[in-house]
Image: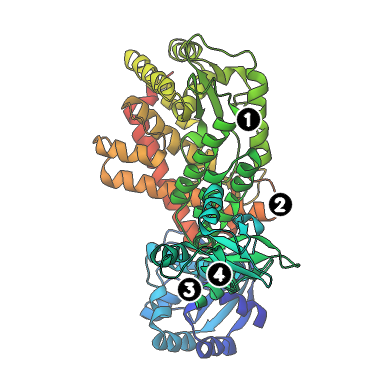
């Protein structure tokens, strides 16, 4: 029992209790068992206990005996009725054998009187509780940061010079290496020379007779050993007010320089570090090494409660730099001003966070199609394989001739999509409309989007058929706001099919109609609001719903990634807390409402 109660300390509102308050609750708490169909709280009665579910389920029924809510593991109920001293308006009935904690009413009220934050939790809004969850995630993430150790991959190359080297010559070495400091190898240990020392040299070289690099070094240089705790290194650099730290191996040889900005980046989200590594990459191995750090950054940001759309934006920007590097390194120089690299699907929408699949293509200028394109595109895809991007099952990749051809061939496809449409062609049309150019002759992609807009404008009826795909999948929210689970996935729902697809495709169809060039769904929603099609309220609800879906999916995918399982689009409803289930239900209701708006706008009821 004590162990079970200890687990509550990491869950709001028990995170607000001090030791004495928690000890008092622990002293009076009891574990209770109730079989199915037990009436725990009757309508018009005040609960005698605060209930905290360990295992099982309790459903809430209104006066018409219709189910309106459900409580599961870690959920709490009965608190508001006890605090207000008001009879319950609903009946609480056990629907799955229940094991729970019971906190007596008198003890619960006494703790509420002593701790206003604990009491406030029971009356807080969904937004306020989301903030509490964010604080909980920040606290949990700190434990991981505290035990992280120095990784060689975050070090800069150390430039080591002899103590008798002339200062100007040493400065040339530093400049050629693109370094921010120099190390001086003395008979007994290392000294360090930074920008501050060079300023000293400029100001005093005449009156001090400064000629050799050893004359301006800071000696001995404060250093750290390979494998040291990063938190200890942060304390060391803070204590001595230094920005550069030599890192030594077991034999006291320099293996690199740690810069304070990179260390601080690690303790924030590592994005600066990855960006710098990507920009400094001189070969494919460097690009691969930098790109592989993305999962660590994503996990850190998610743990801190950063919104998924901001994580996606950051990941998209880093991936963009990666693709620019790969384009420059792999695509022959003679091609680079005659083709453009485009990203499609979720990558084109800048919504892919974890690496789910590759979606890329090449567009060549008219009349240009190199003979050795197969070997080049194969190398490009293999590098993405090494980074960790799974190959697209639908083969939407540049190694497929369908997605690697001259611009006139793409125009023929667009013409065919409009003039002789079918399901597969609409799918290609949707994929392409979400594309964005990242490198090479970007004007080729712009020309294709212009051509698509013009063809749709000439045949506006195509939009009715294009938008109809929002009806492909049923909502996982059934009668009385209950989740409809996937038959093959117990207590799980496919968030992509059941929610994301309808929202993204509905917005996509409207963006195509309004000739909106943004590919990101959130930006398209904002553009539809600016155009007057969507009200501010509807736009806000759609963006919040999108955030809920992406956040829950990302959390589920990170859990699977940590366990070495393949990532997919299923989320376990059973593992969600009461707050998260409520948010999911509201988000699904928003999508259902939006589907009706799209259906009415495009007259989908009359589409054959």
Q: Say which residue label 1 marks.
A: 380
- Dot 4 surroundings within 10 Å: few (below 14), some, or many (20 or more)? some
Find the residue positioned furthest to the left: 532
Q: Quadrant of the C terminus?
A: top left
Q: Residue at x 57, y 19 (%)?
A: 404
Q: Position of residue 600 (x, y in %)?
A: 33, 30
- Left or right side of 120 for 562: right
Question: Which label belongs to residue 241?
Answer: 3
Q: Secondary structure at mark 2?
A: loop
Vertical arrangement, residue 313 with respect to residue 186, above or below: above
- Dot 1 surroundings within 10 Å: few (below 14), some, or many (20 or more)? some
Whole-angstrom CA distance, mark 1 to mark 3, is: 44 Å
Asked if marks 1 and 4 touch (Cβ < 8 Å), the reply is: no
Asked if marks 2 and 3 touch (Cβ < 8 Å), the reply is: no
Whole-angstrom CA distance, mark 4 to mark 3, is: 23 Å
Q: Position of residue 65 (x, y in %)?
A: 46, 59
Asked if marks 1 and 2 touch (Cβ < 8 Å), the reply is: no
Q: Position of residue 76 (x, y in %)?
A: 51, 71
Kindly tell me whether residue 1 is visible in this rendering.
no
Whole-angstrom CA distance, mark 2 to mark 3, is: 41 Å
Whole-angstrom CA distance, mark 1 to mark 2, is: 26 Å
Vertical arrangement, residue 339 with respect to residue 226, above or below: above
Q: Say which residue label 4 marks.
A: 142
Question: Which label belongs to residue 564?
Answer: 2
Q: Secondary structure at mark 4?
A: helix
Q: How many numbered marks are there?
A: 4
Q: Residue at x 44, y 70 (%)?
A: 208
Q: Quadrant of residue 220?
A: bottom right
Vertical arrangement, residue 426 with respect to residue 533, above or below: above
């Amino acid at each position: 029992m004590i162990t079970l109660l200890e687990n509550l300390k990491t869950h709001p509102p028990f995170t607000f209790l001090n030791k004495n308050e928690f000890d008092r609750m622990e002293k009076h708490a009891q574990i209770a068992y109730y079989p199915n169909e037990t009436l725990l709280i009757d309508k018009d009665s005040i609960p005698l206990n605060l209930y905290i579910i360990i295992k099982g389920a309790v459903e809430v029924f209104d006066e018409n005996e219709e189910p309106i809510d459900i409580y599961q593991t870690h959920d709490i109920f009965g608190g508001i009725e006890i605090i207000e001293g008001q009879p319950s308006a609903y009946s609480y009935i056990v629907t799955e054998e229940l094991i729970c904690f019971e906190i007596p009413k008198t003890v619960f009220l006494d703790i509420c009187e002593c701790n206003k934050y604990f009491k406030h939790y029971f009356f807080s809004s969904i937004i306020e509780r989301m903030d509490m969850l964010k604080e909980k995630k920040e606290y949990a993430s700190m434990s991981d940061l505290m035990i992280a150790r120095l990784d060689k991959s975050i070090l800069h190359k150390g430039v080591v010079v002899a103590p008798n080297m002339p200062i100007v010559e040493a400065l040339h070495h530093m400049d050629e290496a693109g370094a921010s400091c120099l190390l001086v190898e003395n008979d007994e240990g290392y000294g360090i020379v930074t920008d501050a020392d060079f300023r000293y040299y400029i100001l005093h070289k005449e009156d001090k007779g400064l000629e050799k690099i050893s004359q301006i070094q800071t000696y001995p240089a404060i250093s750290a050993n390979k494998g040291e705790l990063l938190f200890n290194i942060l304390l060391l650099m803070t204590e001595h007010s230094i920005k550069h730290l030599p890192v030594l191996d077991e034999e006291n040889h320099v293996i690199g320089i740690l810069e304070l900005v990179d260390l601080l980046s690690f303790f924030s989200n590592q994005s600066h570090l990855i960006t710098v590594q990507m920009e400094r990459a001189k070969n494919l191995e460097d690009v691969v090494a930098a790109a592989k750090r993305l999962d660590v950054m994503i996990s850190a940001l998610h743990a801190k409660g950063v919104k998924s759309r901001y994580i996606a934006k950051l990941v998209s920007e880093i991936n963009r730099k990666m693709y620019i590097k790969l384009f420059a390194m792999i695509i022959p120089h003679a091609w680079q001003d005659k083709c453009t690299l485009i990203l499609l699907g979720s990558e084109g929408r800048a919504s892919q966070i974890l690496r789910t699949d590759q979606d890329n293509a090449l567009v060549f200028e008219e009349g240009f199609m190199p003979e050795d394109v197969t070997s080049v595109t194969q190398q490009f895809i293999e590098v993405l394989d090494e980074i960790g991007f799974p190959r697209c099952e639908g083969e939407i990749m540049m190694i497929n001739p369908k997605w690697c051809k001259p611009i006139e061939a793409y125009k023929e496809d667009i013409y065919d999509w409009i003039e002789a449409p079918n399901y597969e062609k609409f799918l290609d049309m949707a994929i392409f409309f979400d594309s964005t150019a990242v490198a090479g002759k970007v004007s080729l992609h712009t020309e294709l989007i212009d051509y698509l807009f013009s063809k749709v404008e000439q045949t506006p009826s195509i939009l009715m058929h294009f938008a109809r795909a929002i009806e492909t999948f049923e909502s996982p929210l059934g009668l009385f706001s209950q989740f409809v689970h996937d038959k093959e996935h117990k207590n799980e729902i496919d968030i992509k099919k059941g929610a994301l697809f309808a929202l993204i495709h509905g917005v996509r169809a409207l963006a195509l109609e309004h000739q909106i060039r943004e590919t990101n769904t959130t930006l398209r929603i904002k553009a539809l609001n600016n155009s007057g099609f969507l009200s501010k309220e509807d736009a806000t609800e759609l963006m919040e719903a999108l955030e809920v879906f992406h956040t829950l999916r990302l959390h589920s995918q990170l859990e699977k990634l940590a366990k070495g399982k393949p990532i997919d689009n299923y989320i376990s409803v059973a593992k969600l807390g009461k707050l998260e289930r409520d948010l999911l239900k509201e988000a699904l209701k928003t999508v259902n409402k939006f589907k009706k708006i799209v259906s009415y706008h495009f007259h989908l009821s009359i589409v054959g």
